[in-house]
Amino acid sequence: MRKTFVLDTNVLLHDPQALTRFEDNAVVIPIEVVEEIDRFKRDPSEKGRNARQISRLLDGLREKGNLADGVPIDANGGSLQVVFCRSETLAQLPPELKGGNGDNNILAVALEQLRSGLIADQPPVVLVTKDTNLRIKADAVGLTAQDYTTDKVDIADLYPGVCELSASATAMEALRGEGGLPLAELPSAQGVTLQANEGVTLVDQAQPNHTLLARYDGRRQALLPLQRAGKVRLGKVAARNREQTFALDLLLDPAVQLLTLVGKAGTGKTLLALAAGLHQVADEHLYERLLVTRPVISLGKEIGFLPGSLEEKMGPWMQPIIDNLDFLLGGNADDDTPRGASGRGGANRPQRSNWTDLKGMGLLEVEAISYIRGRSIPHQFMVVDEAQNLTPHEVKTIVTRVGEGTKIVFTGDPYQIDNPYVDAESNGLTWLVERFKGQPLAGHVTLLRGERSELAELAANLL
């Protein structure tokens, strides 16, 4: 059934192309939304860029006719109309909502659309807003309201990047001996859809304790045994569990140019990425430089402006990266103290000069995401940490900076978001996982088990 969608300002600022996402339905924009967009157009942030893009889009649609009367959006039958808030409709709102602020004006427009539809037998009206309180108000006055979910990803159904299949001992031996096994020769894989570069654990049908790790090659439609990560130890770092083994295999494969690592705190996402990057930059010379960046979003209340140069300002934000690099570069390589892909170890606390020496040699660069627009980044191993705090637009901007011969790795935990404008289902990291699922150039692994410490793992599970 054709519907009328009344859009709030935050929907358009979140996705400037939202006007075109409603197919053959009618889209109504209250004039209050246009006013609020105008107030954001000088903002230097992403919201300002989106506001300017919306204004240009509306101006282009204005050439098709009078926006007050409604203009076609595309050939599917969708239409757009800019509507004023009538004072008599605003007066009919409950006394608590007669303040005349922006939300109440938008609510009045939606209510007017609903009442006119009831009289003229027009399509049902839906108010679309990302404002939770406005949705509550709409429900209280009898309006249907919903969140903007076009770019949302159901976190419960997020692609894990790994799976298990049963196999005979003969098939597992063939995979190990011949270096590959066509998927058609594995009966348990019939009816199962595997994505390119997905990690597969083959479980022996006769002996469930006997397993073999493989990766699915989408081009050859075959399983390949892990070549790189099985016994690899990158300095102090080695894979401690199955998911880390799959992640390390993808990190060390230059053919996988984009990799996303998702997992709770302490699963080794950042340390594995940095260890693989340093190894391929400094030891194998596959890339010219290790480039590390992360969004500048604080956990709690801001403490004010930071003094000094750009490098000095970035210091507190990059301290987690510096800690991991210090662990990788410092200490005695022959030390027998147990360490894993998220452990700090005990002895031989490294000196800060280790990572500064790498910077002096041009092997390491720390970049602020704020200044990445317009850059072209060729032949580098790029790590984007805490990517769950990025919006889909910011992720697109970063990925489109990648030049020839560059590998980019996004790490993050969708349940640890500090950005107030995204959540576990609308952030750029989960959006990227779903968009690149199955692409031959991309890979993904969800890390499950924490390796930082027993206490950190317990806290991640209980708190």
Image (spheres, grey):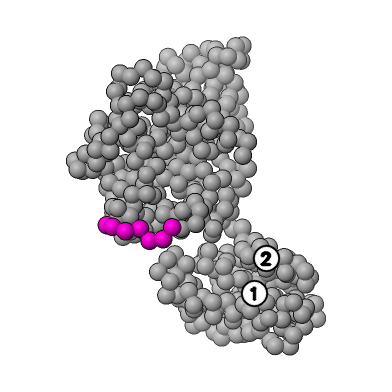
Picture coordinates of residue 224, whole percent (x, y):
44, 25
Location of residue 130 with respect to 31 vertically, above or below: above
Give the magenta-colored segment's residue range. 303-309
Quarter-of-image position of residue 73: bottom right
* Residue that carries the numbered disc 1 in the rendered image: 103
The chief SS type of the magenta part is loop
Foreground residue among 243 and 304: 304
* Residue that carries the numbered disc 2 in the rendered image: 133
Residue 404 falls left or right of residue 459: left
Q: Which kind of residue does numbered mark 2 sit on? A: Asn
For the point 70% across and 79% down, which residue is it? 108
Residue 419 falls left or right of residue 355: right
For the point 57% across and 66% down, which residue is it? 11
Q: Do the residues labelled 1 and 2 touch (CB within 8 Å)?
A: yes
Picture coordinates of residue 39, whole percent (x, y):
49, 77
Quarter-of-image position of residue 440: top left
Residue 458 falls left or right of residue 293: right
Numbered circle sitting on residue 329: none
Q: Which kind of residue does numbered mark 1 sit on? A: Asp
Picture coordinates of residue 153, whole percent (x, y):
58, 50
For the point 43% across and 68% down, which residue is it? 49
Q: What is the C-alpha distance between the residues marked 1 and 2?
A: 9 Å
Foreground residue among 187 and 312: 312
